[in-house]
Image: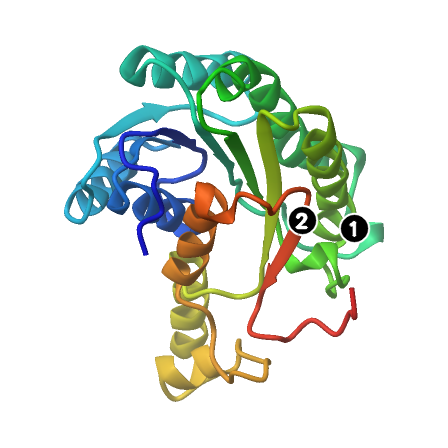
Amino acid sequence: MDLQIDGNAALVTASSSGLGKASATALAREGANVVINGRDEDRLEDAKAEIEAVATGEVVTQQGDLTDEDDLTRLVETTVDEFGTIDHLVTSAGGPPSGPFLETDDEDWYHAYDLLVMSVVRLAREAEPYLSEGEETGTIVNITSRSVKEALDSLVLSNSVRMSVIGLEKTLSQEFAPDVRANAVLPGPHETSRIQDLVEQAVERDEYDSYEEGLDDWAGNPLERVGDPMELGNTVAYLSSPVSGFINGDSIVIDGGSTGANL
């Protein structure tokens, strides 16, 4: 399927690894010019090389911390300087620390809110003039977590703070329309480097006999496997394209069917 985004400009945050990188890869493979972002310059360059191996669009790196307002401004400026505009904004961020409520202090809460919510607020504010100016509808896709639909054990910060991103996404889908569509994806476990590291560490502790056994323990869904990051990335690219042009203000769970919520 031709997603009709060839030559478009996309900014994808936290895209030096994981689901952000998969989303940037899917967009670049479809011909979009992509700015990728991360805090580690070496990891960013490695990600760029991997994405360029399959890309038909251009890939540019911009180092930056999502909790730093100046870095976020530079991200938008770099995208506009390189490609003239921004057609698609994809927001991703690393997860906040796990832990129960009584072991979480004020600093943890403020940092999680700054990382997960204010980064989206600031980027949407900075990018909106460019998202709105194109001939085609601009798009925002927020990568959050299935914890928005169903609270997960020992993830009080993710369970609580990510809800604000969904409220923001729904509001932007109304206030920015019809020039900009806003949607969210809510992933469950995918075989990212973070999960790979956790499983490998568990194997070293003799909790599992093999990597495959440990990975299977993360599945817990009717499909009996964890997701491939590109499965989520492909969905992000689809939501960023005019092919999905009547999807707006939605939150799509991508977890193999593990979430028990009806809505």
The alpha-carbon separation of the residues under discs 1 and 2 comes to: 33 Å
Which one is in front, 229 or 183?
183
Q: Residue at x 32, y 56 (%)?
A: 1
Taking the view exactly as shown, the residue that stands out farthest to the left is 53
Q: Quadrant location of residue 249?
A: top right
Horizontally, residue 4 falls left or right of residue 54, namely right
Taking the view exactly as shown, the residue that stands out farthest to the right is 102
Q: What residue did someone put label 1 on?
A: 103
Q: How many marks?
A: 2
The percent position of residue 200, horizontal first and vertical second, equals: 38, 71
Please indicate, yes or no, whether residue 59 appears anywhere in the rendered image. Answer: yes
Placement of 10 over or under 100, stated as above or below: above
Q: Nearer the viewer, mark 1 or mark 2?
A: 2
Q: Tell me the element at label 1.
A: helix
The percent position of residue 178, horizontal first and vertical second, equals: 63, 28
Q: What residue did someone put label 2 on?
A: 250
Circle 1 residues within 10 Å: few <14, some 14–19, many ≥20 = few
Please indicate, yes or no, whether residue 206 appears anywhere in the rendered image. Answer: no
Which one is in front, 157 or 100?
157
Q: Residue at x 72, y 42 (%)?
A: 166
Q: Residue at x 51, y 29 (%)?
A: 137
Q: Quadrant location of residue 60?
A: top left
